[in-house]
């Protein structure tokens, strides 16, 4: 299931990149799980999700994701350990209970944008 979440997030990024290039609204599938469900994960499940998320992002270029955006993300998260990424996701989700109903993939992206200032300038 964690691999499916990573794949869904990857699909979100690819769709978001296409949407930005096309400058028209695009439907983004919600993926698997909500932010609230992440709250219920054990520490090891949160870690596994973070690993799957980063691994999914790492290979998204193979599916046509914007290489400039991937390089910016890589520069930010490369020095981090997966436990740090999991902690970033956990903190963001806990700090935004008004968004717990939203897809976990979207909230994961929001958390990474908050942790990686250079990603903010891309949108």
Image: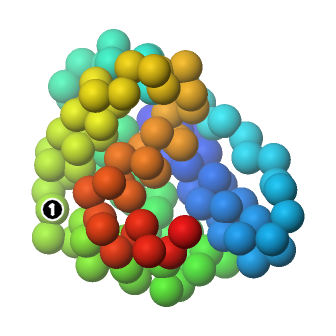
For this rendering, which residue is in front, 118 or 45?
Answer: 118
Residue nearest the observer in this picture, 48 or 93:
93
Label 1 neighbour load within 10 Å: few <14, some 14-19, many 20+: few
Q: Would you say 34 lies left or right of 110 here?
A: right
Q: At x 44% / y 74%, what residue is drawn? A: 121
Nearest the eye: 4 or 65: 65
In this view, which residue lies farthest toward the top? 40
Q: Residue at x 14, y 57 (%)?
A: 81
Identify which residue is drawn at 30% across, 36% down. 92
Q: Seen in the image, is 39 located left or right of residue 37?
A: left
Residue 17 drawn above or below residue 32: below
- Colouring method of the image: rainbow
- Using the rendered view, name the quadrant where residue 119 is placed: bottom left
Instruction: Identify the residue under disc 1.
Output: 80
- Counting from the top left corner in percent of width and height, residue 77 is at 25, 66
Residue 19 locus on image (x, y percent):
76, 65
Say if 86 sits above or below 34 in the image: below
Residue 41, image quadrant: top left
Residue 63 lies, with reference to residue 90, above or below; the image says below
Q: Report if residue 113 is visible in the image.
A: yes
Give the quadrant of residue 54.
bottom left
Residue 86 locus on image (x, y percent): 24, 41
Please indicate, yes or no, whether residue 52 appears anywhere in the rendered image: no
Q: Position of residue 35 (x, y in %)?
A: 45, 26
Instruction: Determine the secondary structure under disc 1.
Output: loop
Q: Residue furthest bottom?
A: 68
Where, quadrant-wise, is the C terminus in this rendering?
bottom right
Q: Residue at x 73, y 41 (%)?
A: 29
């Amino acid at each position: 299931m964690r691999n499916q979440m990573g794949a869904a997030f990857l699909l979100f990024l690819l769709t978001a990149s296409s949407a930005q290039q096309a400058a028209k609204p695009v439907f983004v599938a919600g993926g698997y799980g909500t932010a609230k469900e992440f709250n219920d994960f054990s520490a090891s499940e949160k870690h596994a999700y973070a690993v799957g998320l980063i691994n999914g992002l790492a290979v998204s270029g193979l599916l046509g994701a914007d290489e400039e955006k991937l390089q910016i993300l890589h520069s930010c998260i490369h020095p981090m350990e997966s436990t740090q990424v999991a902690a970033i996701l956990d903190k963001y989700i806990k700090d935004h209970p008004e968004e717990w109903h939203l897809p976990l993939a979207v909230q994961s992206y929001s958390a990474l944008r908050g942790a990686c200032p250079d990603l903010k300038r891309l949108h």
